[in-house]
């Protein structure tokens, strides 16, 4: 008989096990009795919310009121009947996919498991613990407080050093962000957060590992299949493998002999269909069906594994005219510029992240032209749903292992725990088409070098990758440079391992080797975002600028009208960045003119600031990707793509999947064809120590073509003097240009008209137009800082909405026209405040637009549902 699986998804209940002297827990009598679980999998905060015993932590300052939950111990229980097949099966096991975190499991009153790592799945043989057939069995799971257990571990092993939140977190193999981060609240969860199953079998397939090799001309490929089985009393002797193409047609079939529980095969694909990242080609996926057969071909077990034929490599080669080496991803023989977003868990309460939500998030990443997501090391090892979405949408995955900003212990018990964790998780995800790189963790080297949280910088040889490390000032290198690479090399040598992010060269922040986190803007020196051009590295795996979410989301966390001002306590509560309130104000003051603004205007300015910062960084760094030997920067991963709750942060899509205005700026720069303008000098701000001979700017134009084909088009310029209030003719306003494939192309300096003076305020528009007159890319460059600009009082934007043609991609068309240059026009619906919280936002063809006077634009939109459209733009509060 084949293996059977029963998922225990119903009949669960929960209660308080021990208040641990929490007066709040003791004051709620209901929780001391068994209460039916609202859903499964579960964490206790979800149950308390469902029972209306907790206030919503997404609202106001409620998160401060729920900390008692993490301080208490909780129990879950479930009854299930003994399977009818129990007597005829060799194995009856309980499979726990994930228990958060300190869990003691009893079955029928006998302890069968103790777990202290939320990332380790467990199989427990329960055959000898079951009641007779037809009788119920009871599972009881005690979840002890991570705060309490952390104190015990701290007492035993000593206090760690932490830059972020509670240092006890580093003793505990639990998602680090549960302890709070600079974009999320402290919500220390516990519970059976992943499914629990009963499996019965005589023999089963344990693991299937599929790897592939492409040959240089990619006209054929080879796959290698390794199957591990669990020993059987039936004398298993055959594994049947069948490879199906995307249409379900059989490509390969073969019988494999099982020896010592293992079966292997190497097969050739003469005409492979390749998997490509988003924007580079199709995402072709094959399916491997693996069947375990016993004597007389009796079916014992079968599994399916999706895989792809593709090659992914990290290229580190010398540059022609720059020091150091590239840090560049090559897929199927093609060097590509990485357009990425950093991913944190999409909710504080993990069971709320459904498959549908994962696909919606990754769909938004694809829409913004991302081709990579970096899974940050302070979260979780992401789920099958996440990887399915990335596989199907062509999003490469850089996956940190679960270490972040830490001073982790290296005693034997900790390392043994980590070893089991990483072995289990790497084995689980290694077949994924999208998996491009495994990384040891986040910022552990960088923070040691900087001496953050310490009395001084940690001194160590960054070039030493051999050790021994135990008796040095930075012993954690044993984890990143020995333990983790040894595990990944054994289990998935085909996936590149990188010790940490950032890492490489003479220091973790060496801009010429490896990846860097560029926080000179915002965090460290707080340099102007206009300086991103000079702050590049070979690969920028983190950088960011704060921005408020849209007002519909702000309304959630600021429900009290008394708190609707930029410096309120509720606003500060939903901005976790250290000193963020002063940094936002400083960057706004540097760029925009404002005083006594409403919360709406202040939030909008932050959104515009974020849009501008991301535009500067991405344009300037893509400009450094200039073909072989000239890839001075080969990727940029924005911190961050998403949020775990409604908050002001660096994200460009908020917790509710509502895009911030910066989403559209990012999408335009990451589009297959993009264009940029560099203005010199960047700013009209006067530095008396470094006077300029003239205020007349010079302009240079560049464009990026991420496609594989050379493109011929026309560069069209249009200029307006904001000071004189009139259009300005430039000597060459049209020019035929050719964009080289897969790289940046410099389009040259712009010849200024002789009429320009030091008082001219030139707004310059550049468009790339094809032979049919379609605008392929467009940018408008402005005199900065914006705080110096004064819009005429009669400035207006005229909007019109009409139904799109039947069968068109959009439901409505919004036409826009302005009588003055307009900066940062954000279109949004006329909200009904009584709308459901999860009502989707309209989907816009484009948004956050710059307009030239008299220029009419049309924008498609879905989801208006008859609502009007409102405009928001820079300085409209002064009109």
Image (cartoon, grey):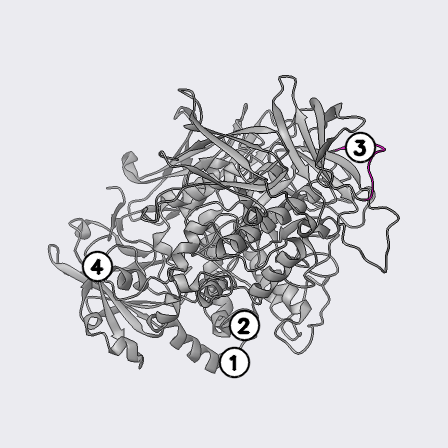
* 4 and 2 marks in contact (CB < 8 Å): no
Label 2: how many Cα within 10 Å (few below 14, some 14–19, many 20+):
some
Q: Which residue is mark 4?
A: 12
Q: Nearer the viewer, residue 437 or 193?
A: 193
Q: Which callout, 4 or 3, points to the residue nearer the camera?
A: 3
* 3 and 2 marks in contact (CB < 8 Å): no
> Mark 2 or mark 1, which has the lower sequence index?
1
The stretch of residues the image draws in magenta is 746-758
Number of residue marks: 4
Label 3: how many Cα within 10 Å (few below 14, some 14–19, many 20+):
few
* Alpha-carbon span between mark 2 and mark 1: 9 Å
* Alpha-carbon span between mark 4 and mark 1: 38 Å
Q: Is residue 224 left or right of residue 471?
A: left
- Residue 302: image location, x then y, percent: 33, 39
Asked whether residue 729 appears in the rendered view, the answer is yes
Residue 158 bears which disc, if any? 1
> Mark 4 or mark 1, which has the lower sequence index?
4
Q: Nearer the viewer, residue 262 or 755?
A: 755
* Alpha-carbon span between mark 1 and mark 3: 61 Å
Q: Is residue 764 left or right of residue 287?
A: right
Q: Secondary structure at mark 3?
A: strand
Which residue shows up at 82% across the image and 37% down it? Answer: 756
Q: Secondary structure at mark 1?
A: loop
Q: Could you tell me which quadrant the N terminus lies in?
A: top left
Q: Is residue 613 magenta?
A: no
Q: Which residue is mark 3?
A: 748
Q: Secondary structure at mark 2?
A: loop
């Amino acid at each position: 008989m084949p293996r059977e699986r029963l998922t225990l998804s119903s009949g669960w209940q929960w209660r308080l096990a021990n208040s641990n002297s929490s007066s709040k827990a003791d004051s709620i009598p209901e929780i001391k009795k068994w209460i039916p679980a609202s859903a499964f999998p579960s964490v206790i905060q979800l149950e308390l919310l469902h029972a209306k015993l907790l206030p919503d932590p997404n609202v106001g300052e409620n998160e401060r009121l729920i900390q008692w939950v993490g301080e208490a111990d909780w129990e879950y229980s479930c009854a299930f009947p003994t399977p009818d097949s129990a007597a005829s099966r060799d194995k009856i096991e309980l499979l726990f996919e994930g228990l958060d975190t300190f869990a003691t499991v009893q079955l029928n009153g006998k302890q069968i498991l103790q777990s202290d790592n939320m990332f380790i799945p467990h199989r427990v043989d329960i055959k000898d613990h079951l009641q007779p057939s037809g009788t119920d069995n009871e599972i009881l799971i005690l979840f002890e407080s991570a705060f309490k257990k952390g104190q015990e571990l701290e007492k035993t092993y000593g206090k760690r050093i932490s830059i972020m939140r509670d240092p006890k977190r580093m003793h505990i193999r639990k998602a680090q962000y549960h302890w709070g981060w600079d974009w999320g609240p402290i919500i220390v969860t516990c519970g059976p957060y992943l499914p629990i199953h009963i499996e019965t079998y005589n023999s089963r397939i344990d693991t299937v590992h599929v790897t592939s090799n492409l040959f240089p001309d990619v006209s054929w490929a080879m796959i290698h299949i390794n199957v591990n089985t669990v020993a059987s009393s039936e004398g298993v002797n055959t594994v049947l493998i069948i490879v199906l193409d995307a249409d379900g047609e059989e490509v390969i079939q073969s019988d494999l002999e099982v020896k010592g529980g293992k079966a292997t095969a190497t097969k050739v694909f003469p005409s492979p269909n390749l998997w490509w990242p988003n924007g580079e080609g199709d995402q072709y996926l094959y399916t491997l069906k693996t069947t375990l057969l016993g004597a007389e071909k009796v079916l014992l077990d079968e599994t399916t594994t999706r895989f792809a034929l593709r090659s992914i490599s990290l290229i580190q080669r010398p540059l022609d005219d720059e020091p150091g080496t590239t840090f560049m991803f090559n897929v199927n023989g093609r060097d590509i510029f990485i357009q990425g977003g950093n991913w944190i868990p999409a909710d504080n309460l993990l069971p709320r992240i459904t498959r549908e939500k994962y696909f919606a998030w990754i769909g938004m990443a694809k829409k913004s032209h991302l081709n990579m997501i970096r899974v940050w090391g302070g979260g979780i090892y992401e789920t099958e749903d996440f990887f399915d979405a990335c596989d199907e949408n062509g999003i490469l995955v850089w996956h940190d292992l679960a270490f972040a900003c830490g001073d982790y212990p290296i005693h034997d018990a900790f390392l043994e725990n980590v070893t089991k964790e990483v072995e289990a998780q790497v084995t689980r995800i290694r077949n994924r088409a999208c998996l491009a790189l495994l990384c040891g963790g986040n910022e552990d080297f960088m923070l040691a070098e900087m001496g953050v949280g310490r009395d001084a910088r940690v001194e160590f040889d960054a070039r030493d990758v051999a050790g021994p490390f135990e008796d040095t000032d930075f012993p954690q290198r044993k984890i990143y440079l020995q333990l983790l690479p040894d595990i990944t090399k054994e289990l998935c040598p085909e996936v590149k391992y990188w010790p940490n992010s950032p890492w490489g060269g003479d220091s973790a922040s060496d801009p010429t080797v490896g990846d860097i986190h560029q926080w000179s803007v915002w965090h460290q020196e707080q340099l102007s975002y206009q300086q991103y051009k000079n702050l590049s590295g070979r690969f920028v795996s983190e950088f960011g600028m704060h921005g408020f979410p849209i007002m519909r989301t702000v309304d959630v966390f600021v429900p009290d009208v008394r708190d609707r001002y930029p410096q309120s306590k509720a606003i500060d509560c939903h901005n976790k960045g250290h000193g963020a309130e002063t940094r936002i104000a400083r960057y706004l003051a540097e760029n925009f003119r404002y005083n006594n603004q409403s919360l709406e205007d202040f939030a909008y300015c932050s959104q515009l600031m974020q849009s501008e910062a991301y535009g500067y960084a991405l344009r300037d760094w893509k400009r450094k990707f200039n073909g072989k030997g000239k890839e001075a920067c080969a990727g940029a991963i924005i911190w961050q793509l998403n949020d775990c709750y409604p908050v002001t942060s660096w994200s460009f899509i908020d917790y509710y999947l509502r895009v911030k205005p910066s989403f559209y700026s990012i999408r335009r720069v990451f589009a297959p064809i993009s264009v940029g303008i560099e203005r010199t000098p960047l700013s009209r701000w006067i530095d008396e120590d470094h006077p300029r001979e003239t205020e007349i700017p010079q302009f240079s134009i560049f464009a990026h073509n991420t496609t594989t084909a050379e493109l011929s088009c026309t560069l069209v310029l249009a200029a307006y003097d904001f000071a004189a209030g009139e259009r300005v003719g430039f000597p060459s306003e049209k020019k035929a240009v050719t964009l080289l494939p897969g790289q940046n192309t410099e389009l040259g300096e712009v010849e200024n008209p002789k009429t320009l003076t030091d008082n001219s305020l030139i707004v310059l528009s550049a468009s790339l137009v094809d032979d049919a007159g379609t605008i392929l890319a467009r940018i408008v460059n402005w005199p900065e800082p914006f705080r110096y600009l004064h819009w005429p009082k009669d400035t207006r934007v005229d909007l019109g909405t009409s139904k799109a043609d039947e069968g068109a991609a959009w439901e409505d068309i919004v036409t826009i026209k302005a009588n003055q240059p307009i900066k940062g026009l954000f279109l949004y619906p006329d909200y009904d405040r009584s709308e459901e919280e999860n009502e989707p936002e309209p989907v816009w063809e484009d948004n956050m637009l710059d307009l030239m006077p008299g220029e009419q634009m049309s924008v498609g939109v879905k989801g208006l549902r008859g609502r009007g459209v409102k405009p928001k733009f820079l300085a409209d509060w002064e009109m």
